Amino acid sequence: MEHKDISRRSVLKGGSAALAGLTLLHVTGLERAFGQSGAEVIPWLDQPPPNPIPGGVGNLLEWQQLSSWQTPAQNFFFVNHYGPPTSLDESTWRLDIGGLVARPRSLTLADLKARPRQEVDFTLECSGNHGFDFFIGGVGNATWAGARLSALLEEAGLLERASEVVFWGADSGALTIRDNPGVLSAGNTGSGTPDGSGGIDLTITEQFARSMSVEEAMNSDNLLCYQMNGQPLPPEHGFPLRLIAPGWYGVANVKWLTRIEVIDRRFTGRFMARDYVSIREGQRDGKAAWTFTNVGRARLKSAPAKVTRVGNRYSIMGAAWGAPIGGVEVQVDDGNWRAATVDRSTPQQSRRFG
C-alpha cells in the first residue's frame, strides 16, 4: 500500500440493529482501537474544502484525528439555525410543560436536578452530515445526563386526545413566507408586504421547535439533559437544558429548551414541514412523482476514519453508529467482501473487529 493509493473509499459495511452508540471497527487486527502509540497517520488525499459557514456549523470531526471514543465538549460539532440565545439565565430560566395536560408545570433547573439522574451514551449526528462536500464531520459521541422525560409527562397527566409533543427552544429568528392571494390566515401578527405578483411576503419571528408523537416522546431513553460528559451543558450545546432523544438525528434534540407543549394534531412549524424534509423522486404512470418525508430517526451508518502505519504494517480504522453492529464485512480494493471477526473482549462502545 502506497501513500498515493489512499483515498476515502468504502471499506466497511455494518449490519442491522436498533440502539445508538459509536462502535470502532478495527480492520487489520486487535491492536488498540485508536491505533498504536507512535503510529504514523496517513492523511486522506480527498480532504473536505473549508467550512463556508463557521458561525452556523462548527467543530466538525476530523476523522483522521479520531483518538478517543468520547468527544470532548469543546470539540463537539454544532449547528445553529438562529444562533445561540443570549438572554438565558439559570436564575430566571424555567421549563414550562403545558397544553393538553391535566397538571401544567413550571420547573427550575434545580427542580430537574433534584429528580433521579439518568445517563445515556449517545452518538449525535446531524441529518445533513455528508450532504455537502465540506460537511463530513457532523457527528460526535458524548455521555449525556439529566431527568427522564417520560416521568415528567406522566406526572403532568396527558389528556386522552393528546397525540403530539412539541419541544420549543429559546432560539428564534425572522422568517419571510411568500403567500398566494387569499391564503393568509386572519389574525397574524407578522408584517406583510406585496410581492409584486398578487401575493404577500409575510415576515414573522419563528421560535425553533420540533415535535414527535406521544408514543415516541414517552420512550424511557429520552432525557431532559443538563450535563454533557459529566460537566454542565455548555452554552453552545443547549445550556441550561436540551432534549436528548437517542436514535434521532441531531435536529430533533432541541437545544435551549424552554417549553414542552402537548397538542392533538401534527405540528407543522418550519423545522418539521418546510426544512428538514427529504425529497425523493419516483415514478407514477411513467411520470416523475416526488415524495416528501420528515427527517426523524437516524439510520445505521459507517465511515472509514483513518489509516496508520507502523513500519510496513498498515491499520485501517472505521466507525459505525446509529445502531448496534450485527456484523461487519471488509473489502480491500476490488476484492471480495469478507466477514470480519468480532472481538467481544472490550465494551460495546469501543468494541474492536479484526
Image (spheres, rainbow, N blue to C red):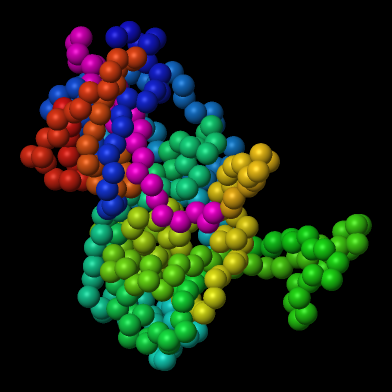
Q: Residue at x 46, y 63 (%)?
A: 254
Of residues 46 and 283, the one nearer the viewer is 283
Q: Quadrant of the N terminus?
A: top left
| Span of residues in magenta | 293-318
Where does the C terminus fall, quadrant-wise?
top left
Q: Is residue 40 above or below residue 278?
A: above
The one of 260 and 185 positioned closer to us in this rendering: 185
In this picture, residue 177 sits left or right of residue 267: right
Residue at 29% over, 65% down: 221
Find residue 296 and report its horizontal and vertical position in percent: 45, 56
6 to 64, vertically: above or below? above
Identify the image quadrant of residue 245: bottom left
Residue 70 visible in this rendered orientation of the protein: no
- Determine the main secondary structure of the stretch shown in magenta: strand
Rendered location of residue 308, percent (x, y): 26, 21
**Which corner quadrant of the image does residue 329 belong to?**
top left
Residue sticking out furthest to the bottom: 102
Q: Name the residue at 75% across, 65% down.
A: 203
- Any part of residue 162 in sight: yes
Tell me if residue 299 is in the magenta stretch.
yes
Does the stretch in magenta take in 256? no
Say if 117 sits above or below 122 in the image. below
Q: Nearer the viewer, residue 205 or 273?
A: 273
